[in-house]
Amino acid sequence: MEPKPHPPRLDVLLASEAPVGLVFRRGPRKLVRVVAWNREQDTFKPGQWFKGRIYVDRSDLSPDGKHLIYFAMGGVRWAIAATKGTWTAISCVPSITALALWGQGDTWGGGGMFTSNHSYWLEANQTTFPIRDDSGLRRLAARPHASRLERDGWVIKDKAWNRPAFEKAIANGWSLRRIGWDGGYELEQPGECRLSFPNWEWADWDRHRLAWTESGCLKAAHLGSHKLGPIHTLCDFNAMNPPAR
């Protein structure tokens, strides 16, 4: 009997001013696929496959969901040799083809945040070097926020470097808590109840509902009294395999 394949890992970015999301499907091995998510109709538009790693925690969507800034590492040594193996890019959603590109060569710098639909901040250091910028967007020098999570309403509750905790007030007295970098969440109504979801990889409040990923699926539910409402699977990414070579 063949072993059951591991489900892909899923991470998500949400646009703040438009019903747009971007799902990053990782697996098998060093393969990532970016999938655009229409959050009004819950439809999905697959983008490119990428061999390497995209650091979603150092990436961002523009408020209107039209542009992506991301930090990546090539899956082979010669990947985009001009970047020295790691880079920051700006692209049009859901493509990851670079409109703007900066080489990095390490993982100490790189990535960025949007400050508006027309401007961004780049996390650059002494090893960051420009290659091209045809994005038409304006680069700002000052860091706008300590982190994307804090910009989006998350508050640091525990600063332990290996297991930080972030908390976000969502709706009807509920708080959503993210524990550590590798997933695991809690829902709490202070003084009422606490629910634990150690298998959630990503979770956030999507306008009027809670959305999360687990076991290769994107799911959503409304919040009830002391519990989640009926759970809906919005998309199962397990069968989305790369084309055979």
Image (cartoon, rainbow, N blue to C red):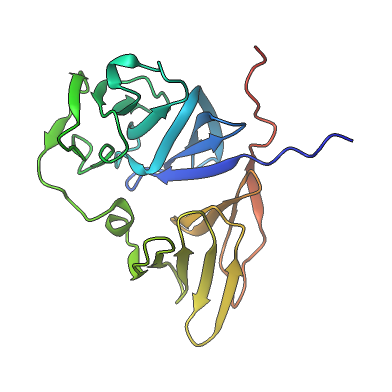
Residue at screen point 18% across, 37% down: 124
Relative height, residue 220 to residue 168 (above, below): above
Q: Nearer the viewer, residue 68 or 45?
A: 68
Above/below status of 216 relative to 89: below
Name the image quarter holding the N terminus.
top right
Q: Is residue 75 left or right of residue 156?
A: right
Residue pictured at 17% horizontal, 23% vertical: 130
Task: Decide if residue 215 is in sight here.
Answer: yes
Residue sitting at the far bottom: 191
Q: Could you tell whether 110 is left or right of 93 in the image?
A: left
Q: Where's residue 32, x and y in %?
A: 52, 30
Say whether residue 22 is left or right of residue 1: left
Is residue 136 in view from this perspective?
Answer: no
Q: Quadrant of residue 235?
A: top right
Where is residue 122 drawn, in percent x and y? 20, 37
Q: Residue at x 30, y 33 (%)?
A: 106
Quarter of the image for residue 158 reads bottom left
